Image (spheres, helix red, strand yellow):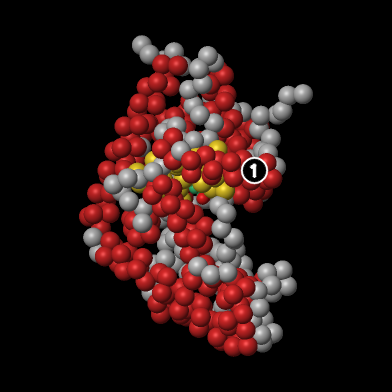
Amino acid sequence: MSRPTTASPSLEVAERRSRALAAAVEAHPRAHRVLTGDRPTGPLHVGHLFGTLLNRVRLQDLGAEVFVLVADYQVLTDREAPADLASDVLGQVADYLAVGIDPGRATIFAHSQVGGLNELLVAFLSVVSVAEVGRNPTVKDELAAAGGGAMSALMFAYPVHQAADILFCHANVVPVGKDQLPHLELARTVARRFNDRYSPTQPYFPEPEGLLSTAPLLLGVDGQKMSKSRRNAIAISASEDETTALVRSARTDAERHVSYEPERRPEVANLVLLAAMCLDEAPGQVAEAVGPGGAEALKATLTDALNDRLRPIRRRRQALAADPGYLREVLARGNEHAGEIAERTLRQVRELMHMVY
Ligand code: TRP
């Protein structure tokens, strides 16, 4: 029986594959090219830090080649280009550098600045069907939210564009959250289709693999999904006073004694977990230490843990933010490097597609 090529594999399969991939990267870091990125919609927060940023630094330090993408075109999928996009982009670069992404070893670039990458999208659009893209859960949700109406064609093409983000540099490792797995599956389909059609004897594109975050999911201080727009997230760049105020506003529950019971007491457990991650301790241990002190003691512990953990990062970030010329230079160098790679790929793609005249 042939497997439908667009079916997203079950989470269990993805998790198993991700564990094997993590071991392979660990064993042969230099055989791996890692690409991941973020939409520049505002300051990155502690969810990003523990969920993905520190892992990127780890992969870089292991010796893997790391590409970090500022996905600025993706901001346009659900809004107009905001007037402050440039400052969000530079702010994101500052966040990356402050947490330890090293521009001497990693490539930080914005996909709007890499023409070859975007041209690859045209070739890729030709190997997937409208129905196939329409089955992508993000596209489907957006279409439903737009009532079948005002979804932009760029939003529709979003997962195919993301395939270009990944394949332009032949990345084979893509650190992502679970929500991105269907996009990755489409990138794999694009790679496979392109290879079957234009390079059948020797596959040209690798089929990229998802490296799933093993960090537990952090919620915002209100117990909801951590998000920039909900104002429930502690930004890496927030001041100590802002951090203190956000933690003070955090939701807890009516029980006095602090415990770590994620199912029964999700809000309290989330605050305990966040403190534990900052302190590099087990959540149970943190809960026990706070115990009878109640919500007030928990918040005091969390505030100190966050501010202590983030202090050196924030110090670096402040120095970086004061030097936008340097941030622009880092980005320009990354754009140039990504641009060279994209041009080479595009040249080879045109050759394979019989488009050399
Ligand atoms: N869609 C991703 C997000 O919203 C960002 C992204 C764009 C990305 N292109 C990518 C992630 C390529 C991994 C690989 O988080």
Work out whether residue 324 can be spotted. yes
Q: Is residue 186 above or below residue 216?
A: above
Q: Is residue 264 above or below residue 30?
A: below
Three-letter code, disc 1: Arg
Residue neighbourhood size for the residue with mark 1, other residues' Cα within 10 Å, grouped as few (<14), some (14–19), many (≥20): few
Residue holding disc 1: 16
Work out whether residue 83 can be spotted. no
Tell me the quarter of the image containing the C terminus. top left
At x 62% / y 67%, what residue is drawn?
224
Q: Is residue 169 above or below residue 106?
A: above
> How many callouts does the rendering have?
1
Left or right of residue 4, residue 278 in this image: left
At x 36% / y 56%, what residue is drawn?
100
In x, y percent, where is residue 254? 69, 85
Element under disc 1:
helix
In x, y percent, where is residue 1? 77, 24
